Amino acid sequence: MIFYFSATGNTLWAAKYLADVMGDTLVDMSSVNAFSEYELGNNERIGFCFPVHGWRPPVLVRNFIKRIRIRNYNANYCWALCTAGDDIGLSMEFLVKDLNRIGISIDSMFSLIMPESYVGLPFMDVDTPQKELTKKETAQNLLVNYAEIIKRRERGVTNTYKGRWPWINSYLLGTVFVKWLITDKPFRVEEEKCIRCGTCANVCPVGDINGGRGLIPEWKHNDTCLTCFNCYHHCPTHAIEYGRRTKHKGQYYFK
């Protein structure tokens, strides 16, 4: 069983590949809204796949782990994989603590550097087409290797890129990110570009947008936004901006 969350598609691509190779079931964490119970088969593997948000697991992922109940768990082999545009900081350490609180231990951990999708800060933008391609090719090769490790149920494997300042990034900058940068308040629509198609509302993983069917999109401002920028990247006319921080920046989602 593989629990996954994905916005722009990087993590979904990796999770689908691993599920196909190993014959495991995919469970979308963003589709679970209440306390949910899952029963493991005898000796069934457990996987967690997610993107890194602010050098931590996304709030949605952490809340999901707090709510789930897994029956028939008996030290089943458990692995985790995260995707990021660069380093992951101490994201896995956060995940380990969250899972330990519900009695689950991680046996192996992996990360993939994937094309950049975070555009919420002035100095951050999507990758060039060549860099995007290079990242995907490298990730594909790593993923093949990771799949073999998981199939063999190897324990104690850690293949992650934490970066130079993991503690500073995850605890200091990560705290700033969670408290002040995860918000839908700066989102706005350039009405002359918007075709009122509702794509942004349809791709939002938390249902934070009203719009489409002839209506201009409106964010609900109800503290559910993940600032994953899925709405921004999928807009077919590039009509969505995040304050002035995304002006003249590119769009990306996995194709």
Image (cartoon, rainbow, N blue to C red):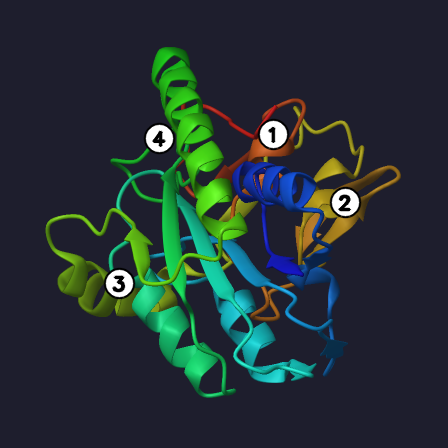
> Mark 1 belongs to which amino acid?
Ala
Residue that sits furthest to the top in the current view = 130
Residue 20 image position (x, y, % from top left): 69, 40
| First in residue order: circle 3 vs circle 2 | 3
Secondary structure beneath disc 1? loop
**Residue 212 in view (yes/no):** yes
Q: Which residue is mark 4?
A: 125
Side of 107 where 251 appears, left or right? right
- For marks 3 and 1, give the one nearer the viewer: 3
The residue carrying pointer 2 sits among few (fewer than 14), some (14 to 19) or many (20 or more) residues within 10 Å by Cα, namely some
Q: Quadrant of residue 254?
A: top right
Q: Which residue is mark 2?
A: 202
Residue at 26% of width from left, 46% of height from top? Answer: 87
Secondary structure beneath disc 3? loop
| First in residue order: circle 4 vs circle 3 | 3
CA gap, disc 4 to disc 2?
24 Å
Q: Which residue is mark 3?
A: 90
Residue 109 image position (x, y, % from top left): 38, 57
Q: Quadrant of residue 237?
A: top right
Residue 119 image position (x, y, % from top left): 39, 38
Side of 2 where 172 appears, left or right? left
Residue at 69% of width from left, 83% of height from top? Answer: 72
| First in residue order: circle 2 vs circle 1 | 2
**Residue 115 in view (yes/no):** no
CA gap, disc 2 to disc 1?
15 Å
Secondary structure beneath disc 4? loop
Q: Which residue is mark 1?
A: 239
Image quarter (top left, top right, bottom left or bottom right) of the C terminus: top right
The residue carrying pointer 3 sits among few (fewer than 14), some (14 to 19) or many (20 or more) residues within 10 Å by Cα, namely many
CA gap, disc 4 to disc 1?
17 Å
Q: Is residue 166 above or below residue 197?
A: below
Residue that sits furthest to the left in the current view = 164
